[in-house]
Image (spheres, rainbow, N blue to C red):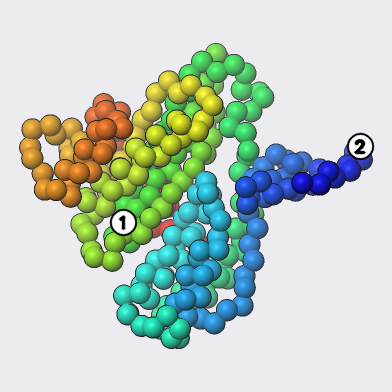
Amino acid sequence: MGVKEILLGDKLPTERALGILWDLEEDELAVQVQIPKKPETRRSLLSMISSIYDPLGFLAPSVIRAKMIFQEECRRRTGWDEKLADKTMTAWRRWLTDLPYLTRIRVPRCYRHESTGSTTDVQLHHFSDASQHAYGVVSYLRMTNAEGAHQISFVCGKAKLAPLKQQTIPRLELCAAVLATRADKQIRKELDQRINRTTFWTDSTAVLQYIRNTERRFHVFVANRISAIHEESNPEQWRHVSSSINPADDASRGLN
């Protein structure tokens, strides 16, 4: 990598770090968006969606909308290079119109600000949610200093499409819960920070009942996912959050 000469007093440049823009001046992470001119076909939709590099899930609520549009077109079982249906084309053009606004997203690179002081408690909080179309998880780091002041930082997010074969909402909520436990395991592995406690949040009372039930035997689909959840978490770590304030709702339903 070449060395850039920066004069004292000059504004620091924006660099690329692992495919993400890094604003050195503000010490923030951002994204760059380019809209290529391609024919409006299923193949082009997939190509465009696949070209978006978002390893930390900053754009998950927006990208999942594009994936929903693509999945809807897949249900029509048309050819890869056939013209999109009118309804799909309208939704796709609307999504492309909104795409440039993603450049306004700025996420602080550092989890802890200098003003926070020494931390006495560090917690991870994972929120999961599901809809008929998708499910997802968003993770936050909560740091508390000696004065009892809290600082919340976004760590990462993830959204996945629901299978083409329709599943019930409780089952999809269970898949979202598994995603939350996997996120916790990955973040703990990657963070150079001791975590005092992890809390998982879901707005599904059915999922909480599944997790806390140790006597009843379930069907294979449910049993496998409950087993995966129990491997990485304890029932005491799971709590209920109202749907109206669940931030993972953005990942499961998508945002403009």
1 or 2: mark nearer the eye: 2
Mark 1: give few (<14), some (14-19) or many (20+) Cα within 10 Å: some
Q: Say which residue appears at 61% left-offset and 77% top-offset.
A: 37
What is the tally of numbered marks visible in this picture?
A: 2
Q: In the current view of this chain or complex, which residue is farthest to the top?
A: 146
**Circle 2 is placed at which residue position?**
8
Earlier in the chain: of badge 1 and badge 2, it is: 2
The reply to whether residue 86 is in sight is: no
Tell me whether circle 1 and circle 2 mark residues in contact (CB < 8 Å). no
Of all residues, the one furthest to the left in this rendering is: 216
The answer for how far apart the CA atoms under marks 1 and 2 are is 52 Å
Q: Would you say 108 lies left or right of 242 here? A: right
Q: Which type of secondary structure does the marked residue at label 2 adopt?
A: loop
Residue 230: image quadrant is top left
Q: Position of residue 221 (x, y in %)?
A: 18, 50
Residue 79 placement (x, y as % from top left): 39, 83
Neighbourhood count class around disc 2 (C-alpha, 10 Å): few under 14, some 14–19, many 20 upward? few
Task: Judge whether 188 appears above or below 48 on screen.
Answer: above
The correct choice, above or below, for 94 with respect to 81 in the image is above
Residue 131 tag number? 1
> Residue 176's x, y, as percent?
32, 47
